Image (tube, rainbow, N blue to C red):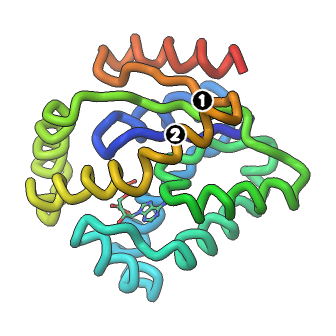
Amino acid sequence: MRIVFMGPPGAGKGTQAAILSKTLGIPHISTGDIFRANVTEGTPLGLEAKKYMDAGEYVPDGVTNAMVRDRLTHDDARPGFILDGYPRTVEQVAELDAMLRSAGTKLDAVIELTVDIDEVVQRLVKRAAEQGRPDDTEDVIRRRLQVYAEQTAPLIAVYDSHGILTQVNGLGEIAVVTVAIAQAVNAQ
Ligand code: AMP
């Protein structure tokens, strides 16, 4: 299955995508994780991405699309994948469509985790402290949520019009959210 997880930062996409990845035996591909790994390793990609990440802005589409295009050609992604944090812009949606079309495949499901914004800010502030992400200040967090609302939230209507979107309340217990996601995936 080829699945996309959407929802604002802090909605629990990473947690849920990791669980579903184990259940389905397909890779969990998080563009944020790939960028962070590159920042840690100090690669040219990491140095480029860091400028944007630190400000809560999106890394330019050209950079992000090339990275995903490469990742999706790895053998483990052939039977399927869960994309977490991609696509995030209209251009990324078009690029992903083109990548899948040229491989003769398409997306099976888009899961949107819905949350209350104030709750999410609290979660992210806590996570920044726990995971040692000192750059994740409340200002940067609010900027990331604003960028999400402006650039990414509109994509939800696009996937809805394709008939592959399911909205799941992300605010419940982790196990409850997992069950709701599994039902949504099975239904597709
Ligand atoms: P995340 O962990 O998914 O919230 O991603 C952390 C940061 O990485 C984001 O705030 C962006 O700066 C960058 N990033 C991750 N995915 C994308 C994407 N699809 N397009 C642009 N920037 C991204």
Mark 2 and mark 1 residues within 8 Å of each other at the beta carbon: yes
When asked about the image quadrant of residue 138, the answer is bottom left
Query: Measured from the top left, where is residue 35 in percent x and y?
Result: 43, 68
- Check disc 2 and report the residue beneath it: 156
Which secondary structure lies at badge 2?
helix
Q: Earlier in the sequence, mark 2 or mark 1?
A: 2
Q: Which residue ends up furthest to the bottom in the rendered image?
A: 44
Q: In the image, is 16 to the left or to the right of 110?
A: left
State which image quarter holds ligand 1: bottom left
Q: Which residue ends up furthest to the right in the rendered image?
A: 104
Query: Measured from the top left, where is residue 166 in percent x and y?
Result: 56, 24
Nearer to us in this view, 62 or 1: 62
Q: Amino acid at mark 1?
A: Leu
Few, some or many residues within 10 Å of mark 1 (<14, 14–19, 20+): many
Relative to 138, say whether 51 is above or below: below
Q: Residue at x 55, y 54 (%)?
A: 87
Query: Measured from the top left, where is residue 48 in percent x and y?
Result: 39, 84
**Quadrant placement of the C terminus:** top right
Mark 2 Cβ and ligand 1 under 8 Å apart: no
Relative to 31, say whether 125 is above or below: above
Q: Residue at x 53, y 54 (%)?
A: 86
Q: Residue at x 15, y 65 (%)?
A: 135
Q: Which mark is residue 91?
A: none
**Quadrant placement of the N terminus:** top right
Q: Residue at x 38, y 77 (%)?
A: 49
Which secondary structure lies at badge 1?
strand
Mark 1 Cβ and ligand 1 under 8 Å apart: no
Few, some or many residues within 10 Å of mark 2 (<14, 14–19, 20+): some
When asked about the image quadrant of residue 184, the answer is top right
Q: Amino acid at mark 2?
A: Ile
- Check disc 1 and report the residue beneath it: 165
Q: In the image, is 148 to the left or to the right of 91?
A: left
